[in-house]
Structures are given as structure tokens and as C-alpha cells.
Image (cartoon, rainbow, N blue to C red):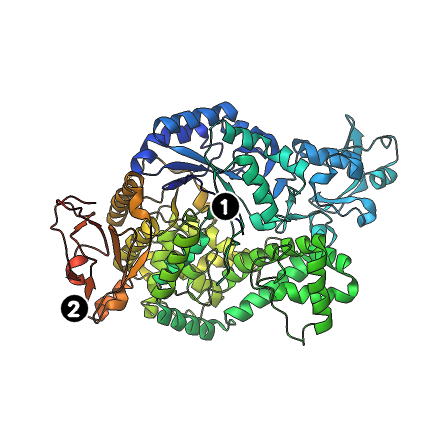
């Protein structure tokens, strides 16, 4: 086991979504404001050359250049200089797993050369291509319909099929159309053929993102040269690694990256940890990007009893199965349909006699993926004997331990399967409490007990103190503040109508809770309609992206309740928002604010959550103003006194309402207490005689300047008299804080 590198780490990061409408210059203009919030680093979405017009940058086409539409390399370096002038560093989001298959294929030069020269190209090692199928041709599912020979022509030294351009294999230019197509190293095809005929590794089920083999040292060097140059020049201080589970050998990649980047670079990985799963301790990184923390914060502020009641009402009113059956059904559908080509690749490598065992092991896996070289194959649960013969399962397990290439492809397929079947399908089918259907979440177990939260925080502080923590990201289906509004239903399940008479009860539940979460936000109707349409297509019960049903889709807007049909949850939600904020910004790890998250920020699934944000914004509500004040105070405290945020010890309240107080100390000089489940606390009659015993010393409330120091056993009705959050700093001898 390798020790974690002693890397300097940010005190807090602020995520910016770059796009042509918000380039490097716009980020530079916001630097002074963002520095005033108290963050130490700006976290930028991918900066390398991407598909023209891309709103996210994860569709990289050229690793050697900084994206021109954002201002190019000089624009990035200018942003770094401006950021430094305001005391800020930069963290870059990098995409090692895949590149774009753009409409203009020539933009991706390595792929273009492979299409022209085939497996003999020096770039062929860049991509996972199975040349032994499809008659030795790379299937390119880029056409809107079946290939029509009448659309094929040669012009300007290129093969044209309709509006698409392809390179010509040497010596084939003069061939007749049919022979010409058969002679190429690729075959243009209808996009629907990707499901069963694809013979290159892709990102999830997205055929226009082709997997990259960064496990090859030459490919690593070629795809990381510019990024390493930017690090060496001091332009950036840290890296976020996108979709590390997509790589053949994540541990090997991270070791190579660490060696190339040096110990002074803060590195976190986008890694979804299943319940009970731990990040491998031998990874030379600071930790994850923080979805595990999101699950803990959301869960500890959710009422398990109310969530269970909602689940029972959901099943009875909609006829939907419970969460385990929903998840398994979605997993089997995605594997047999959307990932049929990936499954076929594994079966070809394992042998047809092991097909059922391969399939059932993928379905049974309880984590996103296993790792080559891990003899225990953690998370890989054997399927029931009724699903696959034990001897076949044992044979596949043996193959996973003996054949590194098979193990890597199995793991990569498993990661895609978990993401697509759970996050992008089952989460849209199961709607008892939508705040629990979030990346990294467990809808079957939405609530986290306080002792579980404390254990998680202690583990984070002990093993991964530099890990990222988040509440909202560019990939969350609902922002933290939307989830906080929906989570009120776990305290008030009576506020959720049964909706059994709706044309589609499942979608009616989704529509009601989405509307409740968004509330009276700007452009409410249009944004809800777009999110509901995406939910219906992703769930794939009545319509989908590949097989749309326009008649069904036309009925979706009818499920949306009018503003007058929604209960007022603002008070309990406001308390929840502030509690989430305080936990996030004081718990172990490095907190990240997503753009606009310093105020009350209500956004739905992308692209809604990726819209440009105005800086500085004006708080849109009293909760927003309180959230910004709390955020700024805590972020500045983290930046100015980082020693306060070291260590972790839970505190226990005493009295009838003790379960409603979540409290802990970080260093011996910093204490945090928040209110859990405020509505249920009010129903129970408030704090009453409940006390919080403070550690020895005099404690000054950070959020209430001028208030008298507190000592000993403090009544919670006094400690939390002005809001759901308090943060205390112990005074040093002589009367001043710490």
C-alpha cells in the first residue's frame, strides 16, 4: 500500500462551466468576486480543443491545443495570471477516457488517420477496436438512415456519403461504389446499428465518444503533454479526472499521472462509490470528486420513516416495483439492448459457453467495477444458481483473474452498465422521493443515520482529508437546493398526493416533485417541461431517445401541477438548505461550490444546470441571502484559518430532542451544530430541555458577532435560537477566539 502523497490542497474550489458564451475572459472577470467568497481555487470544465460549439467540453478532439472558442492558450494563461492576482489557483478537469467522433471527422486527427490506414496506422493503438469482426472494418454509426449507394461519391480526394466526409484508403479511389465501400477500413452505417454491431469501445452508450487507451505509455504521453506543460508552468495546481472507472487500469494510470505531474498537484477522481465501498488506498490521489459526501449530507437530513412511507404509497398508487426490482430490470434491459455490442465483445473473448455467466455476473455486480489484479474481486457477487451454472461462473471468475485484457474490458463494461442502468434509467423510473435519486445515491435507502454520517466523516478525515466534497455539480439531476425542497416530503409524506388517477402515475409523481423542488423559479414551465421530457425518455417506459412516441410525449405537460397545487415548504426547506451548506463547508474534505451555489440555486437536470451564471448575482430570496452570508463566512474561515478544519469528533446532545441535533468538532477549537428534520422537531414541541454539552472552554459564535461566549451544557433552544446552524470557535486564553 502506497502512502498518499503530501500534496498541498485547496481550502475550497469553485466550479465554472466554460463554453463559447462563457470563455476564459468571462471567468477572469468574475475572479475578484469569486475570491471575495473565500474559495482558494477555480475549477474549470475541460479546456482542451472540443467539438465546435460544445457546451461542456468533454468531447475532446485535440489534446495538443487549448480550446480556441474559449480564448485559446493565451486566454487560459491570462486567466491564470488574473486568478493569481486575486489569490486564486486553477484546477483543470481532464478527460482521459474518450475523444469525440465529430460530425467533421477530420477534427479528430488520430481517428481520421486510423480510418484511412486501418490497424497499420501508428494511431491504431489509441483506440480499443476489434478488427476481427465486421469483416475487418470499423463500424461508424454516423448516418441518419440506412446507407444508400446513391449517396456515395468521391470528391476532393475524400469519400462522401451524403453530408459526411471520410478519408479514402490508398489505392481505392477509382473503385466502383460497392467495391469502394468494401475496401475501406471502416463502414459508414445507420446509427441504430451501434447497439449490436459496434466494434470500438465508447463512453457509456454514446457512440460519438470513442474510448482512448491511455494505458499505453505513448498514448498517455500524446494525450497529456499539453496538460502536463500547463502544470509545469504553474498555470494550474490541480486536476479532476473524469470517469476514472472507464479506464482499463485506473491505478496504473494514476501512478503514471502522479509521476508525471509531481506530488505538488492536487488530484481527485470522479468515482462513484457504492454503499460500503471504499476508494482503493493505493491510488495516489487526494480522493474522489465528492459524490460520496453528497450522499451522506443528503441522507443525514432525510427522515427514513417518512421516506419508507412515501415508497409504500408510491408502489401502491402506481403499481411500480420496489427499488431492487426496478434496478435489476433496468440493468437487464440496458445490458441486453443498449450494451448488446459490449456484451458480445466479452462473450467472444470468454467463449459462447460462458455467455450466460458473463451476463449474470455483470448484472449481479454491486459496485461500478472491479479492478485488474485485485484477487478478491470486490463487489462481484455471484448470481443465483438458477441464473447461471456455478461452474460457468467460476470459470468467468478465473478468467477475470488470469486474463488482464478480459478483466479490463469486463470492468469497463460494468462501469458503463451501472451508470446507464441506475443513474440514467432506474433513477428516472423510481420516484417516491426524487431527492434520493442522485448520482451516488441509494433510492432504496435514502436516509443516513447520524452515527453513519459521523463514521463517514471520521474515515474521510483519517484516510482522505484532501478528498473533494460536493452538493451540486454539472451532472447532478437536481441542485442541492431543489433536493432540499423535495426532501421535506420525507418529514411530511402527507403533502404528497397519491396521483393514482393520472394517465401515467409514475410520471405524475416525477412531475409533482420536480415542480415542488423548482418552486417559483424563473421560466418555471419551460424548464419543468424539458426536465420531464428528459425523465420520460431516460426511463424508457413509454418513449425513449431512440424510439420516441410523440403522442405520449405530448401528454407529459398535463402532469405538471399549477403553482397553486403545491404546498409551501419554504420554511423547512430553508432550514435544510442552510444545514446542508454548513455540513458541506465544515465537514472533512475540500468543499466545492458549483457555479451560482453560493445563493439559493434551483436547477434541474442538464442542460438546465449548465446555463451561464451572472457574477456577482443578487440573492433571490431571504434564504439565498442567508446562504450567501453563511457560505462566505465559512469559506473565509477555511481560507484564513485552515488549522481549524483538522480532526473530527462527534458530539452528542442530551434530552428529548437529541436526535434532531447533529454536532461535531473539527479541531479542538471549532464546533458545528445543525438542526435535523426541523418540521418533525416542531411537531414534537421544539428543543425543550435538550442540551448540547460543549467541550471545556469559552465558545464564540462565528455567525453572530457580539454574542456572549458560551460554556458548559448549553440549551439547544438557546444555541440554535436564531437559525438551524451554529458554528463556534473556542477562545484562546486571554479572551480572543483561538
Report the side of 330 relative to 660 (left or right): right
- Residue 335 location (% of width, % of height): 65, 60
Q: Position of residue 228 (x, y in %)?
A: 55, 32
The one of 295 and 673 positioned closer to us in this rendering: 673
Q: CA distance from mark 1 to mark 2?
A: 46 Å
Rendering quarter of residue 449: bottom left
Compared to 187, does 461 lie above or below?
Answer: below
* Disc number lying in front (1 or 2): 1
Q: Nearer the viewer, residue 574 or 131?
A: 131
Residue at left 44%, top 32%?
Answer: 22
Q: Which residue appears at 80% of the width and 36% of the height?
A: 120
Residue 339: quarter of image: bottom right
Residue positioned 64% across, 71% down in the render: 383
Tell me the element at label 1: loop
Label 1 crowd bin: few (<14), some (14–19), many (20+), radius 10 Å: many
Q: Which label was assigned to residue 514?
A: none
SS for dot 2: loop
**Which is more N-terminal, label 2 or label 1?**
1
Count of number-bearing discs: 2
Residue 516 visible in the current orientation = no
Q: Is residue 496 above or below residue 369?
A: below
Point out which mark residue 285 bears.
1
Residue under pointer 2: 688
> Where does the image place residue 220, in percent across and percent down from the top left?
63, 37
Asked if one can make out residue 453 in the rendered structure from this viewpoint, the answer is yes
Amino acid at each position: 500500500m502506497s502512502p498518499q502523497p503530501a500534496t498541498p490542497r485547496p481550502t475550497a474550489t469553485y466550479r465554472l462551466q466554460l463554453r463559447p458564451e462563457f470563455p476564459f475572459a468571462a471567468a477572469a472577470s468574475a475572479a475578484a468576486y469569486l475570491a471575495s467568497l473565500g474559495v482558494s481555487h477555480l475549477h474549470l470544465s475541460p479546456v482542451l480543443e472540443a467539438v465546435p460549439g460544445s457546451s461542456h467540453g468533454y468531447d475532446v478532439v485535440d489534446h495538443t491545443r487549448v480550446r480556441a472558442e474559449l480564448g485559446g492558450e493565451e486566454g487560459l494563461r491570462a486567466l491564470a495570471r488574473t486568478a493569481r492576482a486575486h489569490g486564486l489557483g486553477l484546477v483543470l478537469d481532464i478527460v482521459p477516457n474518450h475523444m469525440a467522433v465529430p460530425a467533421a471527422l477530420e477534427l479528430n486527427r488520430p481517428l481520421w488517420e486510423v480510418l484511412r490506414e486501418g490497424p497499420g496506422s501508428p494511431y491504431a493503438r489509441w483506440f480499443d477496436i476489434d478488427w476481427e469482426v465486421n469483416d475487418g472494418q470499423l463500424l461508424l454509426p454516423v448516418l441518419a438512415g440506412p446507407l444508400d449507394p446513391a449517396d456515395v461519391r468521391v470528391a476532393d480526394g475524400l469519400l462522401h456519403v451524403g453530408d459526411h466526409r471520410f478519408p479514402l484508403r490508398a489505392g481505392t479511389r477509382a473503385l466502383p461504389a460497392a467495391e469502394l465501400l468494401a475496401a475501406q477500413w471502416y463502414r459508414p452505417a445507420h446509427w441504430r446499428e451501434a447497439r449490436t454491431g459496434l466494434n470500438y469501445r465508447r463512453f457509456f452508450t454514446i457512440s460519438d465518444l470513442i474510448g482512448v487507451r491511455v494505458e499505453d505509455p505513448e498514448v498517455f504521453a500524446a494525450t497529456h503533454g499539453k496538460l502536463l506543460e500547463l502544470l509545469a508552468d504553474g498555470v494550474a495546481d490541480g486536476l479532476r479526472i473524469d470517469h476514472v472507472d472507464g479506464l482499463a487500469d485506473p491505478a496504473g494510470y494514476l501512478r503514471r499521472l502522479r509521476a508525471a505531474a509531481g506530488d505538488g498537484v492536487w488530484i481527485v477522481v470522479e468515482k462513484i462509490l457504492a454503499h460500503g465501498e471504499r476508494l482503493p488506498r493505493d491510488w495516489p490521489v487526494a480522493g474522489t470528486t465528492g459524490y460520496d459526501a453528497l450522499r451522506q449530507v443528503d441522507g443525514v437530513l432525510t427522515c427514513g420513516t417518512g421516506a419508507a412511507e412515501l415508497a409504500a404509497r408510491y408502489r401502491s398508487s402506481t403499481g411500480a416495483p420496489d427499488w431492487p426490482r426496478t434496478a435489476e430490470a433496468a440493468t437487464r434491459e440496458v445490458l441486453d439492448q443498449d450494451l448488446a455490442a459490449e456484451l458480445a465483445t466479452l462473450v467472444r473473448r470468454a467463449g459462447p459457453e460462458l455467455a450466460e455467466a458473463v451476463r449474470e455476473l455483470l448484472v449481479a455486480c454491486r459496485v461500478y467495477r472491479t479492478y485488474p489484479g485485485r484477487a478478491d474481486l470486490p463487489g462481484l457477487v455471484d448470481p443465483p444458481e438458477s441464473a447461471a451454472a456455478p461452474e460457468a461462473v467460476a470459470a468467468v471468475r478465473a478468467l477475470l483473474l488470469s486474463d488482464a485484457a478480459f478483466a479490463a474490458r469486463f470492468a469497463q463494461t460494468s462501469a458503463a452498465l451501472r451508470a446507464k442502468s441506475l443513474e440514467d434509467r432506474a433513477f428516472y423510473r423510481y420516484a417516491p422521493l426524487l431527492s434520493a435519486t442522485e448520482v451516488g445515491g441509494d433510492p432504496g435507502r435514502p436516509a443516513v443515520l447520524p452515527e453513519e454520517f459521523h463514521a463517514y466523516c471520521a474515515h474521510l478525515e483519517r484516510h482522505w482529508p484532501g478528498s473533494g466534497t460536493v452538493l451540486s455539480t454539472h451532472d447532478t439531476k437536481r441542485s442541492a437546493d431543489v433536493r432540499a425542497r423535495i426532501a421535506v416530503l420525507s418529514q411530511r409524506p402527507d403533502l404528497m398526493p397519491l396521483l393514482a388517477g393520472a394517465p401515467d402515475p409514475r410520471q405524475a409523481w416525477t412531475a409533482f416533485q420536480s415542480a415542488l423542488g423548482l418552486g417559483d423559479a424563473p421560466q418555471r414551465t419551460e424548464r419543468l417541461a424539458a426536465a420531464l421530457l428528459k425523465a420520460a425518455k431516460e426511463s424508457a417506459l413509454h418513449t425513449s431517445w431512440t424510439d420516441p412516441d410523440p403522442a405520449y410525449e405530448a401528454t407529459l405537460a398535463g402532469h405538471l401541477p399549477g403553482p397553486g397545487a403545491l404546498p409551501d415548504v419554504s420554511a423547512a426547506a430553508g432550514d435544510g438548505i442552510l444545514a446542508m451548506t454548513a455540513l458541506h463547508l465544515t465537514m472533512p474534505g475540500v468543499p466545492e461550490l458549483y457555479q451560482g451555489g453560493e445563493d439559493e440555486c434551483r436547477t434541474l437536470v442538464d442542460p438546465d444546470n449548465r446555463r451561464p451564471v451572472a457574477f456577482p448575482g443578487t440573492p433571490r430570496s431571504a434564504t439565498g441571502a442567508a446562504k450567501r452570508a453563511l457560505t462566505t463566512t465559512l469559506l473565509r474561515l477555511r481560507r484564513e484559518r485552515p488549522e481549524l478544519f483538522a480532526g473530527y469528533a462527534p458530539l452528542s446532545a442530551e434530552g428529548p430532542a437529541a436526535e434532531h441535533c447533529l454536532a461535531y468538532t473539527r479541531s479542538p477549537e471549532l464546533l458545528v451544530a445543525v438542526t435535523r428534520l426541523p418540521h418533525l422537531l416542531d411537531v414534537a414541541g421544539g428543543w425543550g430541555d435538550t442540551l448540547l454539552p460543549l467541550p471545556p472552554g469559552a465558545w464564540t459564535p462565528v455567525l453572530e458577532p457580539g454574542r456572549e461566549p458560551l460554556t458548559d451544557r448549553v440549551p439547544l433552544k438557546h444555541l440554535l435560537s436564531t437559525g438551524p446552524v451554529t458554528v463556534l470557535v473556542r477562545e484562546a486564553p486571554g479572551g480572543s477566539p483561538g
